[in-house]
């Protein structure tokens, strides 16, 4: 399976369970992988046969910068759901890293990664 990768998208957002996190905000890094067949797009050099990266970036940016979530899991679910609804993608992997959590100690980041499949994949070969 082919994949499109959008890695290291950086945003400032207001997500977290604690009121402090939601007031002060923090830095987030989002990675998205999209699994789909890219053969036809590659052969024909046609953007309409693939996924427009700028539209995926826009979905991620809107969710991270314009919304507020208690959980990174919720943000990742919404990003994945919007991508699967908007594009002919079989599977998504969405990772969100919270760079500054306010916790004491030494760490690079804390985050989540989810993998979701399109109903298109589940219905493949069934005439749908």
Image: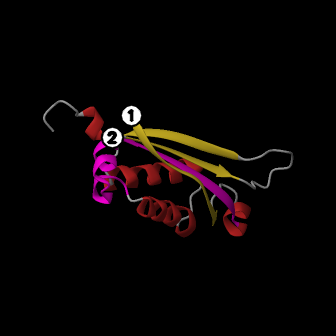
Mark number, residue 1: 1
Q: Quadrant of the C terminus?
A: top left
**Residue at x 65%, y 45% (from the top left corner):** 111
Q: What is the C-alpha distance between the residues marked 2 and 1? A: 6 Å
**Residue 106, located in which quarter of the rendered image?**
top right
Q: Nearer the viewer, residue 57 or 72?
A: 57
Residue 36 located left or right of residue 13: left
Query: Any magenta on residue 116?
Result: no
Q: Is residue 53 visible?
A: yes
- Are there few (<14), some (14-19), or many (20+) residues within 10 Å of tag 2? some
Q: Residue at x 39, y 50 (%)?
A: 81
Q: Is residue 104 above or below residue 116?
A: below
Label 2 SS? loop
Q: Residue at x 39, y 53 (%)?
A: 83
Residue 7 sits above or below residue 10 on the image? above
> Going from the N terminus, do you reach mark 2 or mark 1 first?
1
Residue 77 in picture, x, y percent from top left: 47, 48
Residue tagged by mark 2? 37
Residue 27 magenta? yes
Question: Where is residue 93 drawn, in percent x and y?
Answer: 49, 42
First to last magenta residue range = 25-51
Q: Quadrant of residue 113?
A: top right
Looking at the image, do the residues carrying marks 2 and 1 touch, with CB atoms under 8 Å apart? yes
Question: Dot 1: what SS?
Answer: loop
Report whether 24 appears left or right of 2. Answer: right
| Whether residue 14 is visible | no
Q: Quadrant of residue 65?
A: bottom right
């Amino acid at each position: 399976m082919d994949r499109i990768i959008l890695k290291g998208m950086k945003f400032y957002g207001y997500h977290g369970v604690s009121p402090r996190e939601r007031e002060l905000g923090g830095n987030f890094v989002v990675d998205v992988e999209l699994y789909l067949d890219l053969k036809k797009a590659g052969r024909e050099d046609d953007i309409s046969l693939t996924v427009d990266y700028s539209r995926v970036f826009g979905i991620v940016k809107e969710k991270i910068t314009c919304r507020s979530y208690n959980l990174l899991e919720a943000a990742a679910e919404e990003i994945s759901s919007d991508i699967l609804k908007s594009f002919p993608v079989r599977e998504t992997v969405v990772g969100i890293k919270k760079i500054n959590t306010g916790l004491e100690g030494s760490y690079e980041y804390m985050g989540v990664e989810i993998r979701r499949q399109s109903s298109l994949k589940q219905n493949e070969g069934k005439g749908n």
